[in-house]
Image: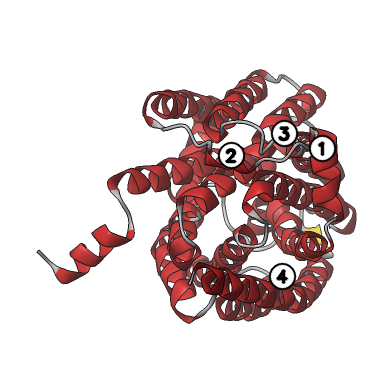
Amino acid sequence: MNPTQSKQEKIFSQYQVFMIAVMAIIQFTIVLDFMVLSPLGAILMPTLHITTAQFGWVVSAYAFSAGASGLLAAGFADKYDRKKLLLFFYVGFLVGTVFCAIAPNYHLLLAARIVTGIFGGVIGSISFAIISDLFKLEVRGRVMGFVQMSFAASQVLGLPIGLLLANKWGWHSPFWMIAGFGILLGAVILVYMKPIDAHLELKSDRNPFEHLVKTVLNPIYLRAFGGTVLLATGGFMLMPFGSAFSTNNLGLSMEQLPLLYGVTGISSMIFGPLIGKFSDKIGMYKVFVIGSVISAIMVAIYTQLGITSLWLIMVLNILLFSGISSRMISASTLMTAVPDPQDRGAFMSVNSSIQQISGGVASAIAGMIVVQSSTGNLERYDVLGYVVIGSVLVSIGLMYWVANYVKEKNSKSKAHIM
């Protein structure tokens, strides 16, 4: 047997490999549902006759409702089998996605995004809690690397296919694709996933409201939540107007967008697991800093561009997304190590809620900063870039504290076991 293969088998059991795949595919559908709006923006704005500010609200409506539901669900997150919670919220997410697929106008699409966000916003936190329950911190970077491949996979498979469907059958069709795929995945989870309820043995007598309050007011958790606020700012600010900026300012055609997203996604799929392994090897915070520096430099360059060749935009996008992936994988792994086991579900729900609300605010602010001129060009995109760079730099300081806390906590845990 190959020594490397033998080592891999010792790291993860067959069931753990299955769960990594399930968590990654769940994230793929959730991320795709959110990200597909960005490339659809170039179609939606003229089709529904909406402004950049209104489109910003379509994006942020999901985030705000997801944030609210995350807070409401936090008190109950550690009181039930995580499999049952996952299935409940995933079914609700699919129902919301179907509503998006049948929405005939702006206002009903806005309402559908709210429904989707209420359920979809909690799923990520449940998934991260499950990962924390099933995998040790020493290998969690690898797990996060594979799970975060969902962002890349949504670009490689989902966004190009979604754009092709939208170009051929209208902007509703990508949502039908997501709903159909999600139903198949839900059936697999129902049949093959085992209950995850070990945390129930650690639960206290606190009622859900008290559990939520204790989690939100915990001074250690509060500082971690502060880091999450800044992490959400960058992606949510630039992402909604990515396709409109590419077609109007950079000179790409709608037919070139699937190729751009596809190439960028393939590179991210390759880098994701490598970044996760690298994160376990040299340290999560070091990878976070490297990713932050790369992201800041690329945002500074990208937001200043005018008409640019497709190949150069591809290169810049690959570098930008490698930086973003490094930040996401390392930060997500660090966050899973912050809460105590009995607070894990509540912490992840509140953290996800804060991320969504912060992202919603960021999207709304981005819609107010960026304006579309009479020629179709997006103006003040460079200003947006400066705001993103500022948040990236400040987040390095906050994540330094999180990394030190996790290091000390892990050391004490090992000493206690010995």
Quarter-of-image position of residue 185? top left
Q: Is residue 36 visible to the viewer in this orientation of the structure?
A: no
Residue 301 as seen in the image, left or right of residue 220? left
Question: Percent x, y for residue 146?
Answer: 43, 56
**Mark 2 element type:** helix
At 58% from the left edge and 57% from the top edge, which residue is drawn?
A: 252
Q: Nearer the viewer, mark 3 or mark 4?
A: 3
Nearest the viewer among 265 and 376 is 265
Q: Nearer the viewer, mark 1 or mark 2?
A: 2
Nearest the viewer among 118 and 398 is 398
- Vertical side of 360 occupied by 180: above or below: above
> Marks 3 and 4, how far apart in space?
42 Å
Q: What amino acid type should be assigned to the residue bearing mark 2?
A: Glu
Residue 401 as seen in the image, left or right of residue 178? right
> Marks 3 and 1, how far apart in space?
14 Å
Q: What amino acid type should be assigned to the residue bearing mark 3?
A: Phe
Residue wearing tag 4: 303
Q: Mark 3 or mark 2: which comes first in sequence? A: 3
> Marks 2 and 4, how far apart in space?
51 Å
Question: Percent x, y for residue 305?
Answer: 68, 72
Which numbered marker is on residue 76? 3
Q: Mark 2 or mark 4: which comes first in sequence? A: 2
Q: What amino acid type should be assigned to the residue bearing mark 1?
A: Ala
> Marks 4 and 1, how far apart in space?
32 Å
Q: Mark 3 or mark 1: which comes first in sequence? A: 1
Circles 1 and 2, Cβ within 8 Å, touching? The answer is no
Q: Mark 4 or mark 1: which comes first in sequence? A: 1
Q: Residues within 10 Å of mark 4 (few under 14, many from 20)?
A: some
> Marks 3 and 2, how far apart in space?
15 Å
Residue wearing tag 1: 68
Residue wearing tag 2: 201
